[in-house]
Image: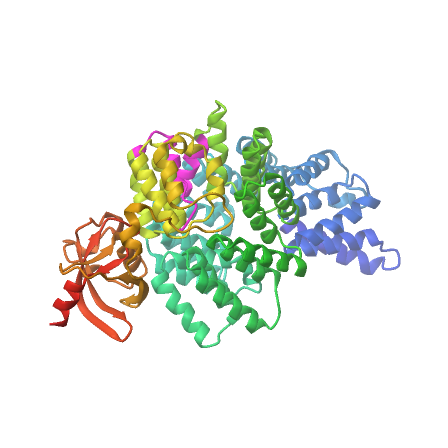
Amino acid sequence: MRRIYTILLSLTVLLPLELKAASANELEIGNGLVAIEEQRFDEAFKYFTNFLNDNNGNQIGLYYRSIAALGKGDKATALSDINKAMTAKAGIMKKKEIKKDELLVQRGMVYLSMGQDDAAITDLSQALVANPSNVNAYVNRGKAQAQKKDLEASDNDYKQALSLEETNLQANLGLAENMISRNDYNGAIGLLSKLNTLYPKNNAIYTQRGDAYQIMGKYREAFDDAMEQISFQEDYTKCMPLLSGRAIQCDTYSLPKISRKISAGENLDLWLQVRAHIYEQLDRYDEAIADYNKLEETLGEEFASICASQGNCYRLKGENDKACAEFKRAIDLEETAEAYANWGAIKFNEGKLDSALLLVNKAVNTDPSNANYYYLRGRIREAQKNYDQAQRDYEMGLQVDRKNSNLLYAHGALLTERKKNGSNDFANICDNEKVTLPANNRKPLALLQQGKSTEAVEWQNKVLAKFPTAANYYDAGLLYASMSMQPKALEMFDRAFNQGFSDFGKMKYERELKDISTTAEYAALMKKWNVADAKQNRKPVNTKADTAKSDLPIIPCTVDGMMLTFTTSNDTAKVFTISIMDVQMLLKYGYMQKNDVVSQRDKDKLDIMGIEPGTEVVLRTFKWGNKTLKNVTATIVEDPLAPILLTQGMLNEIDK
């Protein structure tokens, strides 16, 4: 930013000397430079646009408007302006015209942001010919080399930058990022911790160190870094997704810490939002909605963002009428992209593609910097068989977020289907997805696309072991359907439906279901769950084989503190069983401990998804009504839908 300070200084000298003659144009430049320095890029863009309206083709105006445009994500304008600036004149500020190397660096940065790494390297190399001491040229060429996965060349550029400016933050961050790419996580953490003493309270340092901690499986350290990071933000909303994402990886650690802050009344508007988002990611929608309600009570007024979040919880629960009411309430308060997009997702799920497209168009127009909206619009256009526009949407989304796994997979799969090469997209997914997530894990499918079926299944098992959510069971169904493993695919879908999956409508558009969807077994599963349309969440329909089960009483209970249900029968046999899914949930959310799995030999390496039917588990407390059983043993059954069964014969035995 040295050039900005130079121009600012020239203006401060110019204005006092010629105060009466100082033009509005010069003030526009000064205001624009200050706005860039403070990263208020939208305002800066307006200032330089006003200046260019009176000074058409001015080099300085074009150069700095390119910087502002890039800052606000308008890459097309950024490139157009810097191309014009290359041959433009400085006009009224002729003595302060932009040097050739600085123009080339700016265009290189624009190319870099657009993923045109070779073009970026060409410009940045030319900048270094013009000025071998340009630190920014080395730093940005280092970034471009890293994006091309030439880490050795990238390291060399960063080190050249540091030889010129020993404490350059961006060069050091680049070296740390390369260490992470080489799996040298301890080295990266060491370097970033040193940087933290030089640049305290720096977002990029905390974010990158947290990423390294996460990949190493040190989820608590990653979460603690994110908590520290959000504490010094004036506007914490931008850091909330990162914080909640880190919290989800260690929810049994993070949720109590957050809950203590809420109980103490500390920064309620922040911590209620974070906790609600965590609950939402973990399929605990009622708890999320309760927190959003508390948040509105705390703030004492309605907010569009809260309404939209509540609406999304109802959508994921399958309660679409309530969801749409919340989205309408949000939009009535303030036009919000999230409400439009999620309302569009409902229409997509209902097969109302034209209505869905209208709503998602509004979302994109309201917030063109959100990659997820381009993904949703692309899916809708694919469903309409408008493949060219769908591919364009995926490409536009990837310009916004080049690491978005949903976009990479959709783009790569569409290319492959159209007999083009999508392998780069699948490889990028595998490089980017270092940890498992509560939803949108695309690495298993990407591995399968690369012919790595064994690795695909292994990663899918890791996903389900860490996050046995409805979304992940559904994605596992897509994986096994793609592998022509029909029984396993149907089992995964059944589990997803049992846990509340409600986006049935989109299943007819999934390319992975092309073959399995025509089978009698698939039709039987859909009939079981009464999937006639997608307007509400479904409950399984009792078949003749289920009649005996349906006559049994359903009794509320708590198992080790988790609310479940059980049933009983008059059978004199001594039977106490629990479904494998109930055990997975108890273990996942910390209600049951690993050593409660009786027959598991190595408790430290317990694989939640690898527990076998027939395994015995100890239930420390089993409560219903005014009765409590302690330290009783139950046997796991394979049927994920089976209620806990406690026969009269077992009750009689316990009563003795």
Most extreme residue toward the top, as rendered? 419
Is residue 444 shown to the viewer in this render?
no
Tell me which corner region of the image, top left, top right, bottom left or bottom right, holds residue 475. Answer: top left
Residue 384 image position (x, y, % from top left): 57, 33
Magenta includes 392?
A: no
Tell me which corner region of the image, top left, top right, bottom left or bottom right, holds residue 628. Answer: bottom left
Residue under the point 19% across and 70% down: 630
Asked if residue 409 is positioned above or below residue 615 in the image, the reply reads above
Residue 276 image position (x, y, % from top left): 47, 63
Q: Is residue 249 left or right of residue 373?
A: left
Q: Is residue 198 left or right of residue 27?
A: left
Residue under the point 72% across and 53% down: 32
Q: Is residue 19 left or right of residue 543?
A: right
Most extreme residue toward the right, as rendered? 20
Q: Quadrant of the C terminus?
A: bottom left
Asked if residue 463 is positioned above or below residue 256 in the image, the reply reads above
Is residue 521 shown to the viewer in this render?
yes
Residue 551 image position (x, y, % from top left): 29, 57
Q: Nearer the viewer, residue 180 or 380?
A: 380
Q: Nearer the viewer, residue 173 or 602?
A: 602
Magenta includes 446?
A: yes
Tell me which corner region of the image, top left, top right, bottom left or bottom right, holds residue 562. Answer: bottom left
Magenta-drawn segment: 424-453
